[in-house]
Amino acid sequence: MLPRLRRVSQIVFFGLFLLLLFKAEFRGSLRGTTGDIRLPYPIRLFLESDPLVAISNLLSTHSLYRGLLWSLLIIVPTLFLGRFFCGWICPLGAMNHFFGNLKSEKKRGRQLLESNRYQGWQRLKYYLLIALLVSAILGAQLLSTLDPISLSVRSLALSILPGFNYALNAALDALYRSHNGILSSASDVLHFILGQLVLSFKQLHFRQAFFLGLIFIVLLALNLRITRFWCRALCPLGALLGLLSRWSVLGLEKHAPRCEE
């Protein structure tokens, strides 16, 4: 029952993440605009509820942006429930969980059991967390390189979604130019509907988009060899929440002797 509830939660929050990401597209005009352009609520909800962003911001600026107080919605329950964010809410965690469940020749039988055992290299995420926090103290914001929310937003918004937008537009254009009345009409209808939901009003191109997308795809593909490699070895937010959840009241406990039965 619990795995099904977690799967439903992952689907719901990942869908919400994608919806807010699509809604973040700026469709206005910069002419006559004065002051900063800010994302409205609830679009910036995921970024402002990120505890790692809040702590890094506090260390680098010696002040806490009011909006980042939303991160308490993650920190406080973690003290009682453990790392619920990683397995139930995090969009990158949901993607890694999905690809980690795909069948792979490298994860069968005893190899599957061994791949899920704790390994020394999984401590790497704690060293990365320390490095990011030290860099924030020194005034260098390197957080966005490895924070899972920032990484997901950057990779999807600058590489994956523009590529998806290009491929979808190309497919609809091919239908429209097919010289078939039914297909052309269907293309117009689909273009109108998808234009209101997911299609960008303008095809975007970003420098290093291919490089960013390649890194993101490699991180997901590593799950075919090591289940949830990102979450277990690289995620600094997971490391932070892991430290906060060490003394969680309702967290799960592992009894090593019984695990060998």
Image (cartoon, helix red, strand yellow):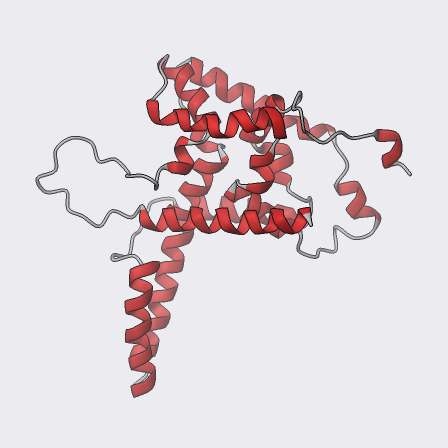
Q: Relative to 104, is 231 on the left or the right?
A: left
Instruction: Residue at 37% x, 12% y: name it.
Output: 62
In depth, the one of 62 and 249 nearer the eye is: 249
Instruction: Residue at 63% x, 27% y: name it.
Output: 124
Quarter in which the C terminus is drawn: top right
The quarter of the picture where residue 54 lies is: top left
x, y percent for residue 218: 56, 47
Mark yes or no: residue 148 visible.
yes
* Residue that extends furthest to the right in the rendered view of this protein: 261
Mark yes or no: residue 210 visible.
no
x, y percent for residue 49: 43, 31
Above or below residue 16? Residue 203 is below
Instruction: Residue at 38% x, 64% y: name it.
Output: 167
Above or below residue 84? Residue 174 is below
x, y percent for residue 73: 48, 29
* Residue that extends furthest to the left in the rendered view of this protein: 32
Instruction: Residue at 28% x, 75% y: name it.
Output: 188
In depth, the one of 112 and 89 nearer the eye is: 89
Q: Relative to 87, is 40 on the left or the right?
A: left
Above or below residue 90? Residue 83 is above
How many numbered marks have been drawn onto this rendered protein structure? 0
Above or below residue 256? Residue 139 is above
x, y percent for residue 243: 62, 22
